[in-house]
Image (spheres, rainbow, N blue to C red):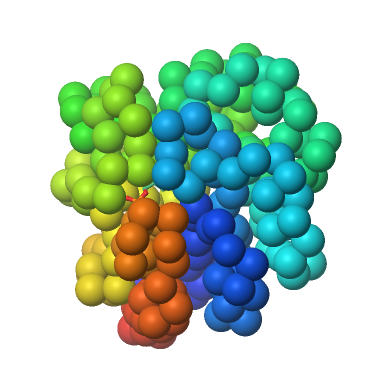
Amino acid sequence: MNAQTHTRIKFCGMTHADDIALACELGVDAIGLVFAERSSRRLTIEQARALRAGIAEGIEVVALFMDNDAATVQRVIDAVRPTVLQFHGREDEAFCAAFDMPYFKAVAMGGDVAADALSHHPRAVALLLDSHASGGAGGTGHAFDWSRIPRESARPFLLAGGLHPENIFDAVTAVHPWGVDVSSGIESAPGEKDAAKMRRFVEEVRRADSSER
Ligand SMILES: O=C(O)c1ccccc1N[C@@H]1O[C@H](COP(=O)(O)O)[C@@H](O)[C@H]1O
């Protein structure tokens, strides 16, 4: 039995104000804005500032970076005012912690997973387990083998990678993550969120939460 009754939900790669309004209405916990250079969901600072204005109070605003330089990260912090940073590349702990903000750090679960992978980045608020191999890029849209998640980890983690409305119930009931993070699984095309998928994703997480009580 899982003591946690509310799995946190992060919708990532939001690019349109009306999708953000729906995400807020659906009660997600966090909204991700992407600044990774090679992403089809990448925003300019001006776009992100406009979208940020539509994010309801109390919802975490997560700025996602992948090996961006420190000056870019600081510019985004100053202009967009995220509440959490997410580092999805090869950033080391000193880099991630230098901005003096809460952060999520992506851990590559797709290749050889080091036995102590979940003990890295002790200052991260949560680790984010994604399906890319070490050194590769995240946001692949593919799931990894969830049985690779070390059972003894006491760290909070967000499950990510290839989640969608059809597999999220199984994911939550099998893995009991602190939170889940989804991008392509609630889209109709890269960067284009799908309202029906967004709704079903949230419903399925809440159905899994109820079944755990
Ligand atoms: O969303 C992106 O475009 C992205 C770009 C570069 C690195 C990570 C990215 N997104 C994150 O990737 C995972 C999994 O995404 P998906 O659901 O499999 O599409 C998730 O943590 C996103 O935040």
Q: Residue furthest right?
A: 78
* Residue 206 vertical position relative to residue 185 in the rendered view, above or below: below
- Where residue 128 appears, as percent x and y from the top left, is 44, 42
- Residue at figure coordinates x 44%, y 26% from the top left: 89
Q: Quadrant of residue 211?
A: bottom left
Q: Which image quarter holds the C terminus?
A: bottom left
* Residue 98 vertical position relative to residue 51 in the rendered view, above or below: above
Q: Quadrant of residue 133?
A: top left
Where in the image, quadrant-wise, is ligand 1 located?
top left
Q: Is residue 49 left or right of residue 200?
A: right
Q: Is residue 213 left or right of residue 105?
A: left
Q: Is residue 115 left or right of residue 74?
A: left
- Where residue 46 appears, as percent x and y from the top left, is 73, 45
- Where residue 154 appears, as percent x and y from the top left, is 44, 43
- Residue at figure coordinates x 43%, y 62% from the top left: 192
Question: Is any atom of residue 163 visible in this view?
Answer: yes
- Residue at figure coordinates x 60%, y 73% from the top left: 18
- Residue at figure coordinates x 61%, y 17% from the top left: 69
Q: Which image quarter holds the N terminus?
A: bottom left
- Where residue 113 appears, as percent x and y from the top left, is 24, 28
Q: Nearer the viewer, residue 47 or 115?
A: 47
Q: Quadrant of residue 70?
A: top right
Question: Is any atom of residue 4 visible in this view?
Answer: no
